[in-house]
Amino acid sequence: MSDSKRQAGFTLVEVMVVVSVMAIVGVVFLGLVSNYFVVITRNNELSEMTVNSQNLLRTTVENIRYGDGVRQTNQIVDAHAPSGGWNTNNTSFVIIIAVPALDNTRAYIINPSTGSPYMNELVYYKSGLTLMERKLANPDAVGNRLQTSCPASSASSSCPADTELASYVRSMLFTLYDQNAAVTNVPADARSVKITLTTERNAPGQPLNLTTTTQVTLRNRF
């Protein structure tokens, strides 16, 4: 047999070396691809959390800024409120915001006895990992465009379900400041409110945490 025929093909050792190298390259490649998708997924979820947090805070700021401030307890009867009614409380993650009652043209509905607008109430409360909004329409405001809402289990055409404001909410804390910029625990004395929203979401690698803070000054005191 000639030397050229004896040298054709690969030896078993060469084949094993090639297979081992290809396996290592494949593992490295899969690791890089997996890491790439983890980074993309985390970035997308963080971006979604950021947008949702900013939208929620923007809406909350508008309600507080143009409303009549924060209330300690709800003054409008809520048949579905917790025992003892709603109470603004950081521990329970509840805040009650008073907002003027509007008609379908978005004009204030004025209380003739006081000369000021009737007030509706918006109750933000945490249910599991979801921040919810309960709407309480003032029954004395004739033509009120706001409709009182209910828990989903009790919702009907006359009482729509509470609104889901945000998901993955770990906490929504608020700090009240009086006219001297000192912290106060009395909602009626509040002239500005700092809101700190913390969201947390499970993601590849480790949970994502996002804390967003904003402060709003009350413009209207009816």
Image (cartoon, rainbow, N blue to C red):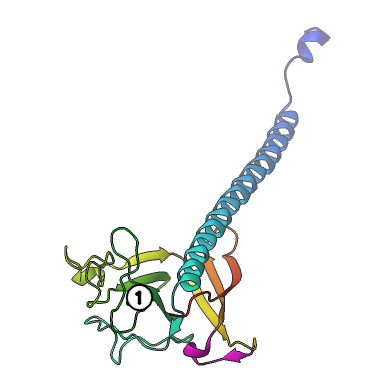
Residue at screen point 44% across, 64% down: 166
Q: Which residues are magenta?
A: 182-190
Residue at screen point 53% across, 67% down: 200
Measuring from the top left, give residue 92's x and y in whole percent: 43, 85
Residue 4 falls in image quadrant: top right
The answer to whether residue 33 is left or right of residue 112 is right
**Amino acid type, residue under disc 1 in the picture:** Pro
Q: Nearer the viewer, residue 215 or 30?
A: 215
Which residue bears the numbered disc 1?
A: 117
Residue 181 seen by the camera: yes
Would you place residue 32 above or below residue 100 in this image?
A: above
Residue 125 seen by the camera: no
Residue at the top extreme? 2
The answer to whether residue 97 is left or right of residue 30 is left
Would you place residue 202 above or below residue 174 in this image?
A: above
Residue 192 falls in image quadrant: bottom right
Measuring from the top left, give residue 3's x and y in whole percent: 83, 10
Q: Nearer the viewer, residue 63 or 24?
A: 63
